[in-house]
Amino acid sequence: ERIKSKTSHLKGVKIAIMGCIVNGPGEMADADFGYVGTGPKVVSLYVGKECVQRNIPEDEADARLIDLIKAHGKWVEPA
């Protein structure tokens, strides 16, 4: 819900949010970005199927995901 509330205004951008690495990469195959729990309070971020940031503290991960979306030119400010 946290991620959805911050990104729901991004039309046409698919973000997969997965609780564990076991199913994550396969289930998010068609997503633009991925947010995958990889340990207690630790997240890895993906662009497509490629892991681009590993072992991010959960309290930093939301902001890092938004930065990643911005870096790929997919971010628009909410209306």
Image: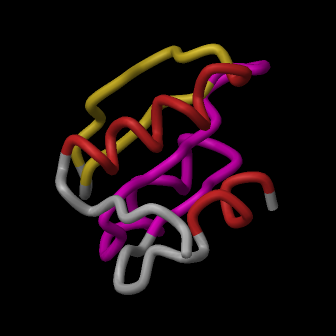
Q: Residue at x 61, y 37 (%)?
A: 62
User: Where residue 27 sits: x, y (%)?
Assistant: 47, 68
Q: Is residue 19 above or below residue 33?
A: above
Q: Residue at x 76, y 20 (%)?
A: 41
Viewer-closest of 8 and 77: 77
In the current view of this chain or complex, which residue is farthest to the bottom?
Answer: 12
- Residue 40 lies in magenta, yes or no? yes
In the current view of this chain or complex, which residue is farthest to the front?
Answer: 79
User: Where residue 7 sits: x, y (%)?
Assistant: 57, 64
Q: Residue at x 46, y 43 (%)?
A: 66
Looking at the picture, the colour scheme in use is secondary structure
Viewer-closest of 75 and 62: 75
Q: Quadrant of the N terminus?
A: bottom right
User: Where residue 8 sits: x, y (%)?
Assistant: 60, 74
Q: Quadrant of the C terminus?
A: bottom right
Viewer-closest of 40 and 77: 77
Query: Exactly how many numbered labels are in the figure?
Result: 0
Query: On the rendered structure, is 72 left or right of 14?
Result: left
What segment carries the magenta color? 15-42
Query: On the rendered structure, is 67 left or right of 52?
Result: right
Query: On the rendered structure, is 48 left or right of 11?
Result: left
Q: Residue at x 70, y 48 (%)?
A: 19
- Residue 17 lies in magenta, yes or no? yes
**Quadrant in which residue 73 is drawn:** bottom left
Q: Is residue 25 above or below residue 55?
A: below
User: Where residue 52 sits: x, y (%)?
Assistant: 26, 30
